[in-house]
Amino acid sequence: MLFLDRLEAGHRLGARLAHLRGEDVVVLGLPRGGVPVAAQVAGALGAPLDVCLVRKLGVPFQPELGMGALGEDGVRVINDAVVRDARVTPEELAQVEERESEVLQRRGRLYRGARAPVDIAGRTVVVVDDGVATGSTARAACRIARARGAARIVLAVPVAPQDWTERLGGDADELVCLETPRDFYAIGQFYADFSQVEDEEVAACLERATGRSHGSAAGAGRVDREVDVVAGAVLLRGQLTVPEGAAGMVVFAHGSGSSRRSPRNRFVAEGLNRAALGTLLFDLLTEDEERDRANVFDTGLLAGRLADATGWLRGQPEAEQLAIGYFGASTGAAAALWAAAEPETHVAAVVSRGGRPDLAGLRLPAVTSPTLLIVGGADLTVLDLNRQAQAQLRCENSLAIVPGATHLFEEPGALEAVTDLARDWFTDHMAPAHV
């Protein structure tokens, strides 16, 4: 395994392509799996994102084996060797082409809607996929870009076979690949998470990119990008999302054993985004630091990182003059309250989900930010700890109990209830920042 998922692969690929920053670049992702990778590359380069519609032509009895590809503008690439070795008849090939052509047209309408394709004439085009296997799809994409007037084509992928440059046949002007491992059987073997990308995710990536390209300042269009958060002497990876007309920002402090990719925190974050609240989900520790379990439970260290991230966030144009709140989950709630007790953080509000506020200890009476403690009704031990911690708070505070919910809020409707409570608390207490 070389990559955790497509987001990590895209982040690393974007860093490798840093030499293209400042050029007139358009990034084209290959649906479906290549689009999340391409979205990270486009964000890193500050470039517009579009799809390059290509459909692999799979061998009838082994559809994962590509015998060619179809693309926009009538581009057709056939791998004669695969067709010959698989003994595919002309009639079988024609049937596959007809079926995939219909899918190609339908997905174009689904992904772009009424939007016209991004104009690539005379520009540098970066074609991105989540990997190369046979190379048929990538070759078709490069030929599509060439037919649409691209001045220069860069084909960039996270992983490919060692002989991948020979397979591409000169269709790209520059080839970029992060890893070319031995014993290459399938792209998915090099990802820990290679789950299928749905059409809705592709459309959402394009929508977010469209908002980003319309402006990066808060209020000038949605921003959704991977960031490196500066916290003292370290860089911490994060995801910054700022809806158009954002009323405030919420910084997430995840619990032990979790990260910025926590599905529960991301669920809550998406609910806050729908309510015009921006979010920053970031890793409180570096990968090396996470190997020492003592760091995971070092509340003072994590609170310091959260305070540093708050200062970094206030320096970002998307968050300028926006109030900032904290959402802490599990042990991350203690770090959120500890950081909120620091006078220089100027935190507008704090929400704890299934938190351990007791771990903030003597810092609790110093918290001045309005604080909401959310606990599952069936999480009896944590509920008792929250009641004890609440008694030490001197700020405006409230304890909300989600009936029947356990510590992880896995019950139907439980996480939705958390999201609604957090949304209302932040919305009621957000005000323009005064720092």
Image (cartoon, rainbow, N blue to C red):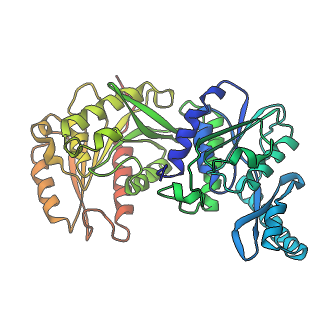
Query: Going by the image, does 368 lie left or right of 305?
Result: left
Residue at point 83%, 65% (across, down): 101
Q: Nearer the viewer, residue 225 or 435?
A: 225
Q: Is residue 333 above or below residue 59?
A: above
Query: Going by the image, does 5 lie left or right of 400?
Result: right
Q: Is residue 423 above or below residue 45?
A: below
Query: Going by the image, does 178 lie left or right of 112?
Result: left
Residue at point 69%, 48% (across, down): 164
Q: Nearer the viewer, residue 303 or 85?
A: 85
Q: Position of residue 286 (x, y in %)?
A: 34, 38
Q: Position of residue 429 (x, y in %)?
A: 33, 41
Q: Is residue 299 above or below residue 383?
A: above
Q: Quarter holding the C terminus?
A: top left
Q: Position of residue 126 (x, y in %)?
A: 71, 39
Q: Nearer the viewer, residue 65 or 314?
A: 65
Q: Nearer the viewer, residue 188 or 88?
A: 88
